[in-house]
Amino acid sequence: MPLILALIGALVRAVGPLVAQVMLSLGFSFISYTGIDFAINEAKARALGALSGNGALFLQFVGVFQIGTAINIIASAFIARTILQGIVGGKLTKMVTKS
């Protein structure tokens, strides 16, 4: 029985790269985008930081028009969109085909 399991394991390890090579030759591939959540959080922090470095009168206008809330809503919309696209752990993997 261990011999059969070893043969099956070797077969699975041999077939994996073969299937990947066939998919690549047919034009199928996968692309991964990493760091999406970091980029969104960094952009949000920089936008809020740029607003806070101005004078008191400007900060009053920012508070009245709730620009900080608008930035948070936009960042949340981007995060929700990436979640709907399939982001997992800050990494988005998509299958692409060559036409």
Image (cartoon, rainbow, N blue to C red):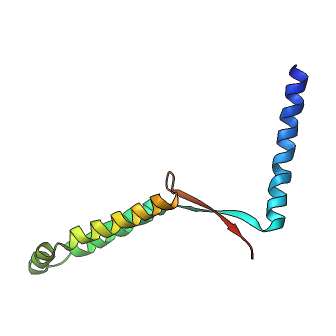
Question: Where, by quadrant of the figure, is residue 10 drawn?
Answer: top right
Quadrant housing the N terminus? top right
x, y percent for residue 67: 21, 74
Q: Residue at x 82, y 53 (%)?
A: 19
Figure check: 24 above or below 61: above
Q: Is residue 56 left or right of residue 94?
A: left
Q: Is residue 66 left or right of residue 82?
A: left
Quadrant housing the C terminus? bottom right
Q: Nearer the viewer, residue 85 or 63?
A: 85
State the residue lying farthest toward the top.
1
x, y percent for residue 15: 85, 46
Figure check: 54 above or below 9: below
Q: Is residue 74 left or right of residue 14?
A: left
x, y percent for residue 92: 55, 59
Q: Is residue 70 left or right of residue 99?
A: left
x, y percent for residue 35: 50, 60
Q: Residue at x 83, y 34 (%)?
A: 9
Disc tally is 0
Q: Nearer the viewer, residue 50 or 11?
A: 11
